[in-house]
Amino acid sequence: MKSFDSSLLYVLSGTGNTYRVACWIKESFEKTGIMTCIKFIEDADFQSDFQNPDKQLTAVLFPTHGFMPPWSMIKFLFRMPRQKRVPVMSIATRGAVWLGPVKIPGAAGFSNFFSSLILLFKRYDIRGFFSLDMAANMNNLHPSLSTETVKSISEKSKSRINLFLNPVLSGKRVLFTLNNLYEGIWSGLLFWLIPIFPILYLIYGKTSMAKIMFASNNCVSCGMCAKLCPNNGIEMKNFLGKKRPFWTYHCENCMRCMGYCKKKAVEAGHSLGVLQFFLLTIPIFAKLLSLLTSYTGISFEINNFWIMSLVESLYYLPALLLSYWVFWLLIRIPVVNTIFSVTTLTHYFKRYHDPETSIKDLFKKEAK
Ligand SMILES: Cc1cc2nc3c(=O)[nH]c(=O)nc-3n(C[C@H](O)[C@H](O)[C@H](O)COP(=O)(O)O)c2cc1C
Ligand code: SF4
Ligand code: SF4
C-alpha cells in the first residue's frame, strides 16, 4: 500500500544542483504514482501547501553552506507552520571534488541535523534525512570541475537516491545510515575543533564574501544577475548613466549570479579581499583606538578575546560597507576595474552551474 498520495518539495538552490536533485525525486516519485510538486522556498504558500498533510510527504532541500543550511533556509524553516506529526524529510546537497582518481566527498556537517531539529520542534514527523554529493560550486574559491567530472558525480548520486527514497516511501524511517554517521563524525569533529565555526561562517561568510563581489568591464548592464538572485542580493545602481550590479548584505554567496552571467562578468575580488583585510580593517581600527586613547587619556586596550572580537565586529561591518561603496565608485574607471579583474583568480576560473538547469527553470513558479 502506498504511504503517500502526493509530495511537496521545498527547494533552495544556488547553481541548480539542489533543483536537479528535486527533479530526480519528482521523476522517481511520479513513477510510483505520487504526484509531486517542486516549489522554490520563496514561492511557498503554507495555507494551500498543506491541504492533505498526512498523506503528503513534504521535503526541504537545500545546499550546504559552511556545514550549515544557508541563512534563507534557516529563516524558512523557522517560518514553516507548526504541525501535528506531518511527515517530512530533509535533504542537503554538498560539494564533492573529484580530481582524477582522488574522490573527495562533500560534508554537509550540521545541515540536516539542524534542519531536522527545527522541524522536530515544530512537531513534524521526521521520516528521514540524508546528504547527497553534487559538484562543488564554490566558484569564488575554485574553478568549475570538468564537464565529465560533473556528469560522473551527478550520475553516481542519481543512481543512489532511491536507496534512501524507497524505504521512506514504504513508510520506514531513514535516520541511522552510514551517510548520517559520516556527517555525525564531521559534526563531532567541528564541535571539538572549532565549535563556533558554523556561526562564524553564518555571520562573517555572509557579510565579507558578498563585499568582494563585483562586475568586470564585460558587464553589459542587462540586470539578469539581479533578477535571478534568490535573495534579492543585487541592486542595479545607476552611476554616470550606466546601471551596474551592487552586492548587498542580502547576498548569501550561492554563486548563482557568477555561474549564470552570460558575459562571465561577475568576479569575486581576491585582491580586493586582501586589501580590505590588511589595509582597512585592522590598521584603521587600531588607529581609531589609539586616537581615542590620546583624546580621552583612557586606555582602550582590550585583552579579552571575545570582547575584542565583538567590538571589532561593530567596527568591521560598517567599515566594510563603506570601503565597498568607495570601491564600487572607483571600478567605474575602466583601468581600475581591469586592475581588480586581472588580480582576482575568478577571472581565470571556468564558471559553474548545473548543466541541466537553465535560467528558465530557476524562474519557474510551480512544478513542471
Ligand atoms: C558559500 C558556499 C559554502 C559551501 N559550503 C560547503 C560545505 O560546508 N560543505 C560541502 O560539502 N559543500 C559546501 N558547498 C558546496 C555546495 O553545498 C554544493 O555544491 C551544492 O550542491 C550546491 O547546490 P546548489 O547548486 O543547489 O546551490 C558550499 C558552497 C558555497 C557556495
Ligand atoms: S554582471 Fe552579468 S548578468 Fe549582471 S548585469 Fe552585468 S552582464 Fe548582466
Ligand atoms: S547576489 Fe549572487 S551569490 Fe549572492 S545570493 Fe544573489 S545570486 Fe547568490
Image (cartoon, grey):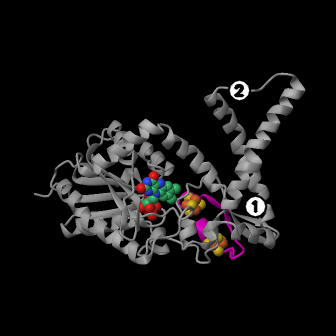
Q: Which residues are magenta?
A: 214-235
Point out the tag, 2 or 1, that comes first from the N-terminus.
2
Q: CA distance from mark 2 to mark 1?
A: 33 Å
Which quadrant contains ligand 3?
bottom right
Residue 90: percent from left, percent from top: 33, 51
Is label 2 in a helix, a strand or a loop?
A: loop
Residue 243: percent from left, percent from top: 73, 69
* Viewer-closest of 328 and 186: 186
**Does the closest atom of ligand 2 sit within 8 Å of the Cβ of label 1?**
no
Q: Which residue is mark 1?
A: 328
Is label 1 in a helix, a strand or a loop?
A: helix
Q: Which residue is mark 2?
A: 302
* Viewer-closest of 364 and 196: 196
Whether residue 63 is visible here, answered yes or no, is no
How many residues crowd around disc 2 within 10 Å: few (fewer than 14), some, or many (20 or more)?
A: few
| Picture layout, residue 214 above or below residue 117 | below
Going by the numbered disc 2, the residue's amino acid type is Ile
Residue 210: percent from left, percent from top: 62, 55
Going by the numbered disc 1, the residue's amino acid type is Trp
Residue 72: percent from left, percent from top: 50, 51
